[in-house]
Amino acid sequence: MKFTIVLLLFLPCVIHGASLPEPRQEVFSATNAEITSLAEQLFSSDANKAVGGDVTLSLQYKASSTQTSSGTDFASQRLFSYVNEAKLFARPTFSRYIALLDNYIKTTGTAESVPTGEITEQNAFVDEIFRTTVFSRLSSFLVSKGYYTSTDSFKADFKEMWFGLYTRTKGPLDSSGFEHVFHGEIHGGKISGFHSWVQFYLQEKAGQINYLSYSADGPWTSYPDVYGFQFKWSTYLKTLGSMFIGSSPEFEFAVYTLCYITRPDSLCTLTAGGHTLKIQTYTWANSSYGNGKRYVASAYPVV
């Protein structure tokens, strides 16, 4: 009977030679060209980024592909020779971001507690970056493409995807997208995540990071730039840690979020300053929030 009803519904189309309706296209799908165009806008509107003289790197030794996993220290000096802290870190998005970095236990397997004071810091940071031109453009784009109904709905979802807790050890709630990507974790006896130049600088300054070598240097001659590093955090090794250098927190979050929402679990190819920029994102598939939405598992530039 069901087959008969379906056949009768489509019979007029067959009789009169009319074409069957095309499958409905999702109204919120963003094309590659649209995403690339927005990425260029985000790159050019990163007003809080470092400029020439604000950050000085001492790259020293470029490791070959056969050397990156050795853990050999090819660099006698620190990676960061200079960062203009008085200028950059006094900016509201930087200062709000840095305030978050001491809120996490880096070793997975231990539950993360989130007291009221830390929630206040999270909200202050999110409020701050949503005031920037970078996030204004990102919000307008995502709303215009139908991913969200308003900036407020995007903002609420942004907090959940990045700061919502989940477990990487099938036990306590010990991780989040923010902790993994921007703070870094020790998981399975090695460094996991850790894609933040500000966190790298602060940990190196505190004597917690030993820079070993670099293996990739992006084509940019100004900031933001993209590099691949080898380093030890305490005694744990990162054989390839890719990260932006000199970018603002809002730019990094905006680019990662753009790719996470429009091209999740895939390689997102953009351009920034006319150069190809590739971002890889992963969703956390083992738990969800809201109506089946997934937390950020990881996001980083591919080098």
Image (cartoon, rainbow, N blue to C red):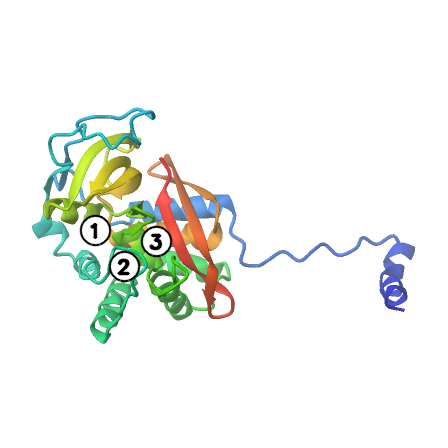
The answer to whether residue 188 is seen in the rendering is yes
Identify which residue is drawn at 28% across, 33% down: 220
The CA distance from mark 1 to mark 3 is 13 Å
The answer to whether residue 224 is seen in the rendering is no
Residue 233 placement, left or right of 192: left
Counting residues from the N terminus, which is met first, the one under dot 2 or under dot 3? 2
Identify which residue is drawn at 27% across, 51% down: 184
Image position of 102 with respect to 204: above or below: below
Identify which residue is drawn at 89% across, 60% down: 11
**Residue identifier under label 1:** 48
Indicate the quadrant where residue 303 lies: top left
Q: Residues within 10 Å of mark 2 (few under 14, many from 20)?
A: some
Coordinates of residue 182 in the picture (x, y in percent): 28, 52
**Residue identifier under label 2:** 132
Q: Are marks 2 and 1 in contact (CB under 8 Å)?
A: yes
Q: Are marks 1 and 3 in contact (CB under 8 Å)?
A: no
Counting residues from the N terminus, which is met first, the one under dot 2 or under dot 1? 1
Coordinates of residue 277 in the picture (x, y in percent): 38, 38
Coordinates of residue 60 in the picture (x, y in percent): 17, 27
| Element type where label 1 sits in the image | loop
Q: Nearer the viewer, residue 285 or 154?
A: 285
| Element type where label 3 sits in the image | helix
Which image quarter holds the N terminus? bottom right
Residue 11 placement, left or right of 272: right
Instruction: Name which residue type carries label 1.
Output: Asn
Could you say which disc has been placed on residue 254 in the image? 3
Residue lying farthest to the left in this orientation: 86
Instruction: Name which residue type carries label 3.
Output: Ala
Q: Nearer the viewer, residue 47 or 286?
A: 286
